Image (cartoon, rainbow, N blue to C red):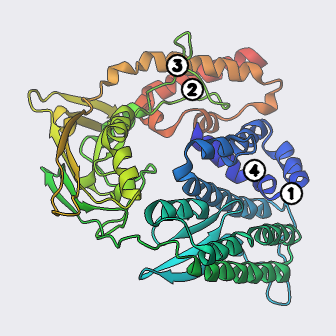
Amino acid sequence: EMLEIVNSFVEGVAGIARGSVEIAANFLEGALGRGVPVAIGFLANQVGLSGIGRRIGEMIERVRALVDRALDWLIDKAVRLGTSFLRSLGVGSGEEESEEGGVEAGHDWRDEEGVFHEEGHQHKVTFNGSNILVASEDPIRLEDLKNEREQRSGPLNDEQLASFNAAVGLKPELETLTDEFSQAQMNNDAAQMSEKERLIREKLQTMANHLQDADLFLGRAPLDPTHVTFAPVSGKAGTVTAEPLTRVPGNTQGEAQSGGGPDLQGWEYVHNVNSMSYILDSQGKPMTTSTGRLRLSKPYKKVHVLSHHLHGPLRYWNLTPGEQVMNSAFLSAFEQTLKDETSADKTYSLSVTLNYYSNQNRVKSIIQGSRTLSAQDSDFAETATVTFGEKNAQTGNYGTQTITVDGTPLPNVEGASLDFTVRHLKSAIDRNVDSWSDRSQVKIWSAYRRDHINRDLQLRLGDTILSELHQHYLQKIGQKFGD
């Protein structure tokens, strides 16, 4: 459901995101119809039009800067894709030529930055529309950086405080410039966009010069980069160790799970279980999307052994199939603590070992068209043994704490009844056909099937059941329109 909302947002609300409400509204009214409430609801919830972003920022102060930048990235990507989509349909002004060669798609004031050097590191200063961010590795709000510095090394002296205030004092000018850039972008004025970008860049560099004199990184000890080693077991994730583990990435880079990643033993089976795991309402009936498809809970995912927040990559030796609850258990048992501690410049050691089911080795299978997808108990971790501890700055030794986190058993596909699915699909056909007021709304079967039955489920159903659904579809159309 979330992917459907994102797709709708990308394709239809670029104008709303940039402020061109009238153009976008006219297009959406004619082209996307019922998608408008979903798109606007998604935009409001995700970028804070209803105040959600602000309240989350107040609750989770330490990660507010990261949240802001992530949302800005989402808006930026959606707008760029959406603008291109609208223009491809002839909506908007088409090509905008200028003496310099026209409006370039790459214009974005968020890419501008100022740079300064302190404590042997280069630090970048950026502005996301609401906060000034400073980063050598992970971005941090300027106010939070000042608070950390004062907790570490005492209050700023008068000269340092004056430099800090001078930097903060430039924020209203940045806000004005970014507003002017947005107006120039709405007017397709490439020359003004370039000029505003130049002024924003200069303002950020002036801010960086002030911050260099504020000594905000004073007393922040240099950290060793994180070093990750791994020992797979039979082609699966086994033991992953990070020592030292700091906020500084080393021989790996953290990569979030976004639906891709390498193939894992048993994953194709799990992926198909996901395609038949439904979200139920209070009466135990499956909920549906706006297009009538069953809403999927997709309870299984590729779980990081070493979290991407702790520099864990998307590699087979760092991923295991598991339920969402396993991922949540990792977060609450140790990951959140280590994220907070390493963000505070502490150094840790972490080792995670997966213990696979071995007392039995059942095999489960799903027929997908002409293929048989199988998984067995030994593809899944029964538990994870986690050992971690903070480094003693005096002795160089690490503390030791060991915990056990539950894993995930082999999923049981019988939990998603095929007969139940077929009954639902037939009921959905009846509802959809009944909603059509005239014969012109009838779709050919291949188009209906594409729009209302996801591809994985089609493969699971097979040709015989799909043919049965096709006949039911034709019969219902005949009953409705007398064919």
- In this rendering, would 62 be left or right of 179? left
Mark yes or no: residue 369 visible. Answer: no
Q: Separation of disc 2 and disc 1 at Cα?
A: 43 Å
Which residue is tagged 2? 470
In primary-sequence order, the first of circles 4 and 3 is 4
Q: What amino acid is found at the position of numbered circle 3 in the picture? A: Leu
- In this rendering, would 416 be left or right of 75? left
Q: Nearer the viewer, residue 13 or 472?
A: 13
Which residue is tagged 4? 12
Which residue is tagged 1? 20
Which residue is tagged 3? 280
Q: Separation of disc 4 and disc 3 at Cα?
A: 29 Å
Q: Nearer the viewer, mark 2 or mark 1?
A: 1
Question: Where residue 78 sits in the image (x, y, percent)?
Answer: 67, 57
Q: What amino acid is found at the position of numbered circle 1 in the picture? A: Ser
Q: Separation of disc 3 and disc 1 at Cα?
A: 38 Å
Q: Separation of disc 4 and disc 2 at Cα?
A: 32 Å
Q: What amino acid is found at the position of numbered circle 2 in the picture? A: His
